């Protein structure tokens, strides 16, 4: 084991803070080139502290301490000490006191975008997880909850809008063309929820009347000139407020709810109390600038941040190990909102796809961790797919096991017990257990164990007894996480999970069978939630007249890999008849994966192009699927999802042995081309039939028609003849919305002909002033399969449309290439790896969080052949040897090389 991974901190070492802070009175004066921050902290000893005489130690990062006062008295040398990022107070402290520091900070030079930073025409903050310490000296941990006021001073002409959390309580002009505003937040909060803004912004205002009749002012602030792109975000906010009242009885508690959009932001958005700060990507949308998916994402992210007001803000996390307490729960809530607002089936399928693309690989790689990790080196690395997406799956399993009504009771109990507190995942599970009466002791393993369990299920039908038996076995081998803990001598307990297996049984005509388990007196319904708790367990269904086809893991009831030996005929049966949308889709994915697995082997054996590995019946199954969109009750959106073959990333994960990215790419492309040729007529007919003539709306029905129509276009483009090219170019030239424009441009980006360069140039020329559209332009090129993608992406680094300081640009060009273009990232000459390493090193010096996200592209390097492994290892070692490497990247690279 190497020792290059930075020092970890452990959950087991948690102790309550020695001091608590009642109030924080901040004064932030933004001047040219710097800001002066005065912080008055009303502190007292924590009666619950482990050591009643512990010293007061505040944390600060990149702060220049000017003065420090204790109850107004200036402290001199010897009464305090600065050591690394800590400020130790040696002066004798009374039980309660006010400590006032004055510090200077440099927001203009803050390229990490954590703390107070400049973006274009304004100053913005990002304090989660540990950004507040970059604004002032503090006990910067979530279990220190205080009431805040902030007074902001800035030049009035340059920064006319001054915002803080809570309510405005004063404002006025100052000398020299400056002005000030004071905000007061009536709620106690941890420092990570602090926010302030000083900027030139336009504002869209609206009102929401809560169920108890309180009027909430809703405001969306955006860069001047972009008001016509805020309407959707505002509507999403009001829908979210209503939904949370209807579904969870949760009401908005502030008079002002503000969303501010900023173009430079590391993540999606941030739930600061009453003053959310959003990446522009999740606010700005107009039919001609944003796709259907963008509109949907805005709904979800706005809802997510709003829902945090209760799950995260009113009840927060005791420490950062509990991050999933707020994130898993809030993602689950935004998923439920998404299912209610859009097609429930499509929403769930998209979530499962995200889980398989991002979370399963994480669970199988060097950064594997449970949703509540026992240790971390850099907390920013744990805003992960596991904490968020798997965390939501864990909450969903509780919901499935105890049922909707008990879940709601559990939520009510959680708020009744913990409103205003900083708590742990145990507290949440206890509320669910107490409200439902279901013992969740074993279930809690989901919080402590890493890895994606495999559920091996076998079915056996006995005609004599008319019994169908399902044998279920759980496999959960140790991951890199457990191996590391073991090597460190830390205890590792592993055991069987408690999970819901939702299922139905289909007869030969596709009808759902009534289900009676052995021991029951009568059948109850056609769908059951089986509670799986043991390593091996059997379930026996009685009165089954003939061998059924089991429909397993409905709605993806648990985040596992299901191993059931379905035949192609059974999968086709499920695709056609299953009442569960997820299972219908899943059957299609499984069928395609089985075929592609054979295709990959054929390509490796040099026989792929014969296409002998494609069953003759496959195109017929897909023809039937396409036709089902037009049958009564057909759902084009679901059919569009089903037409998409498993992605190369998903196929990499599905590979048991060594991954061959070239064979995966070749097989997938060959299957797409085969379907396009075989189904050219029906695809073209569907394409024409699905044309939307009504004015654009992002609503589900239109979006579904566009999704299927563009899926057809994508297939037709694979034929790559004059006819299909003309179809693509016509759509590109005539589309009146960004969804259709991008679908055409994505197809064009694969062409290595004059059409491509001309279309890309025209697109950029039209949209060069819309930053988010330029991101699309970059991404369509970085994810293209065209042979020259690697060179083009390198060249684009120098293009004036690219800016390495802007996270959205980096994600569109660099991360998309590394994470979503396996063919080129894993190029056999190592050029993709070298490109990534160059970018990581360059980025690390300015924005470690972003650099670390790119570094995660190396997570699965050991799955590839020895030649690629040696190329990747060289680059990982090169990164690791860099002097002054951030903790963020050092943790990722160190664990990758362990
Ligand atoms: N809590 C936010 C996400 C977020 C996390 C960290 C950030 O900076 C390191 C920024 C945003 C959410 O879940 O939406
Ligand atoms: Zn969140």
Image (spheres, rainbow, N blue to C red):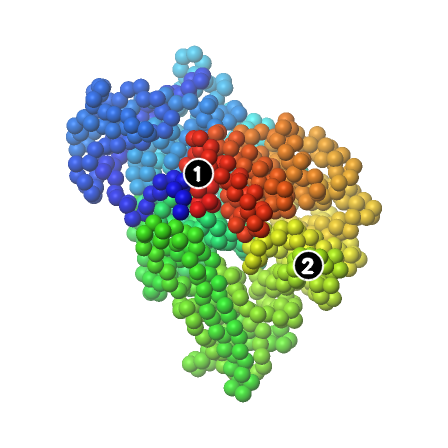
Could you tell whether 627 is left or right of 874 in the image?
Answer: right
| Vertical position of residue 507 compared to residue 60: above or below | below
Label placed on residue 6: none
Q: CA distance from mark 1 to mark 2?
A: 40 Å
Marks 2 and 1: in contact by CB < 8 Å? Answer: no
Q: Position of residue 437 (x, y in %)?
A: 33, 65
Q: Position of residue 325 (x, y in %)?
A: 38, 49
SS under mark 2: loop
Question: To which residue does mark 1 refer?
Answer: 890
Residue sitting farthest toward the bottom: 464
Q: Position of residue 720 (x, y in %)?
A: 78, 48
| Vertical position of residue 502 compared to residue 120: above or below | below
Ligand 1: give its quadrant.
Answer: top left
Residue at screen point 40% across, 47% down: 1
Total marks shown come to 2
Could you tell whether 20 is left or right of 738 in the image?
Answer: left
Question: To which residue does mark 2 refer?
Answer: 605
SS under mark 1: helix
Residue at screen point 45% across, 14% down: 177
Residue at screen point 32% across, 55% down: 491
650, 777: nearer the viewer: 650
Q: Is residue 299 visible?
A: no
Q: Is residue 678 visible?
A: yes
611, 348: nearer the viewer: 611
Residue sitting farthest toward the top: 176
Mark 1 closeness class: few <14, some 14–19, many ≥20 residues within 10 Å: many
Mark 2 closeness class: few <14, some 14–19, many ≥20 residues within 10 Å: few
Q: Position of residue 248 (x, y in %)?
A: 42, 53
């Amino acid at each position: 084991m190497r020792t290059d991974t930075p020092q970890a901190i452990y959950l087991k070492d948690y102790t309550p803070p020695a001091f608590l802070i009642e109030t924080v009175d901040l004064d932030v004066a933004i001047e040219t080139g710097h800001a002066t921050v005065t912080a008055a902290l009303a502190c007292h000893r924590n009666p619950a502290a482990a050591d009643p005489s512990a010293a007061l130690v505040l944390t600060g990062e990149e702060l220049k301490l000017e003065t420090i006062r204790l109850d107004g008295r200036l402290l001199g040398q010897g009464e305090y000490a600065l050591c690394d990022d800590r400020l130790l107070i040696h002066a004798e402290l009374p039980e309660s006191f006010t400590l006032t520091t004055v510090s200077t900070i440099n927001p203009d030079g803050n390229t990490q975008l954590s703390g107070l930073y400049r973006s274009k025409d304004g100053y913005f903050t990002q304090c989660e997880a540990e950004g507040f310490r970059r604004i002032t000296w503090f006990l910067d941990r979530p279990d220190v909850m205080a009431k805040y006021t902030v007074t902001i001073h800035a030049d009035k002409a340059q920064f006319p809008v001054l915002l803080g959390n809570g309510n405005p309580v004063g404002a006025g002009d100052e000398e020299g063309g400056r002005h000030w505003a004071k905000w007061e937040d009536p709620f106690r909060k941890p420092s990570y929820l602090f926010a302030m803004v000083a900027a030139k912004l336009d504002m869209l205002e609206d009102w929401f009347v809560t169920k108890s009749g309180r009027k909430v002012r809703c405001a969306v602030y955006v860069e001047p000139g972009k008001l016509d792109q805020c309407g959707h975000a505002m509507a999403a906010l009001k829908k979210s407020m209503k939904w949370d009242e209807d579904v969870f009885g949760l009401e908005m508690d502030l008079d002002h709810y503000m969303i501010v959009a900023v173009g430079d932001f590391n993540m999606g958005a941030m739930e600061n109390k009453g003053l959310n700060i959003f990446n522009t990507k999740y606010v700005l949308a107009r039919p001609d600038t944003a796709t259907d998916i963008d509109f949907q994402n805005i709904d979800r992210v706005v809802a997510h941040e709003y829902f945090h007001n209760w799950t995260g803000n009113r009840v927060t996390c005791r420490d950062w190990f509990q991050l999933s307490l707020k994130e898993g729960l809030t993602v689950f809530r935004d998923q439920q909102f998404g299912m209610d607002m859009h097609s429930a089936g499509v929403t769930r399928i998209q979530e499962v796809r995200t889980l398989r693309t991002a979370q399963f690989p994480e669970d199988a790689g060097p950064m594997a961790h449970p949703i509540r990790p026992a240790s971390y080196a850099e907390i920013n690395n744990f805003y992960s797919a596991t904490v968020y997406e798997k965390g939501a799956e864990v909450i969903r399993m509780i919901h499935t096991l105890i049922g909707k009504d008990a879940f709601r009771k559990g939520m009510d109990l959680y708020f009744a017990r913990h409103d205003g507190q900083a708590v742990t995942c145990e507290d949440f599970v206890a509320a669910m257990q107490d409200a439902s009466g279901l013992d969740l002791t074993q279930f809690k393993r989901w919080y402590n164990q890493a890895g994606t369990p495999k559920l091996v299920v076998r079915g056996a039908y006995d005609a004599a007894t008319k019994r169908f038996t399902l044998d279920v076995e759980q496999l959960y081998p140790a991951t890199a996480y457990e191996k590391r803990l073991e090597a460190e001598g830390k205890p590792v307990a592993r055991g069987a999970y408690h999970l819901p297996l939702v299922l139905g049984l289909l007869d030969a005509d596709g009808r759902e069978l009534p289900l009676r388990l052995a021991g029951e007196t009568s059948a109850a319904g056609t769908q059951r939630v089986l509670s799986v708790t043991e390593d091996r367990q059997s379930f026996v269904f009685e009165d089954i007249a003939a061998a059924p086809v089991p429909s397993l893991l409905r709605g993806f009831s648990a985040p596992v890999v299901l191993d059931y030996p379905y035949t192609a005929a059974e999968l086709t049966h499920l695709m056609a008849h299953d009442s569960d949308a997820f299972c219908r889709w899943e059957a299609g994915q499984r069928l395609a994966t089985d075929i592609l697995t054979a295709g990959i082997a054929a390509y490796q054996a040099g026989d792929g192009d014969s296409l002998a590995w494609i069953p003759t019946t496959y195109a017929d199954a897909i023809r039937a699927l396409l036709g089902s969109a037009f049958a009564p009750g057909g759902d084009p959106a679901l059919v569009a999802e089903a037409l998409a073959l498993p992605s190369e990333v998903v196929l990499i994960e599905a590979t048991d042995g060594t991954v061959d990215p070239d064979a995966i790419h070749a097989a997938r492309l060959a299957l797409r081309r085969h379907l396009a040729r075989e189904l050219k007529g029906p695809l073209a007919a569907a394409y024409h039939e699905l044309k939307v003539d009504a004015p654009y709306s992002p609503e589900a029905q239109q979006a579904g028609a566009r999704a299927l129509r563009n899926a057809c276009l994508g297939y037709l483009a694979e034929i790559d003849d004059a006819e299909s090219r003309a179809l693509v170019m016509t759509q590109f030239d005539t589309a009146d919305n960004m969804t259709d424009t991008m679908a055409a441009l994505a197809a064009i980006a694969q062409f290595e002909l004059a059409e491509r360069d001309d279309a890309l140039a025209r697109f950029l020329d039209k949209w060069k002033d819309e930053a988010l559209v330029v991101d699309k332009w970059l991404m369509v090129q970085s994810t293209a399969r065209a042979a020259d993608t690697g060179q083009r992406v390198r060249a684009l680094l120098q293009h004036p449309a690219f800016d390495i300081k802007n996270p959205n640009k980096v994600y569109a060009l660099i991360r998309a290439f590394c994470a979503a273009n396996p063919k080129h990232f894993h190029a056999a000459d190592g050029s993709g790896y070298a490109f990534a390493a160059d970018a990581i090193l360059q980025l690390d010096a300015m924005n470690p969080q972003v650099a670390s996200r790119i570094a995660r592209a190396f997570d699965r390097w050991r799955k590839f052949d020895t030649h690629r492994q040696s190329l990747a290892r060289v680059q990982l070692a090169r990164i690791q040897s860099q002097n002054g490497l951030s903790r963020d990247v050092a943790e990722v690279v160190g664990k990758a090389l362990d």
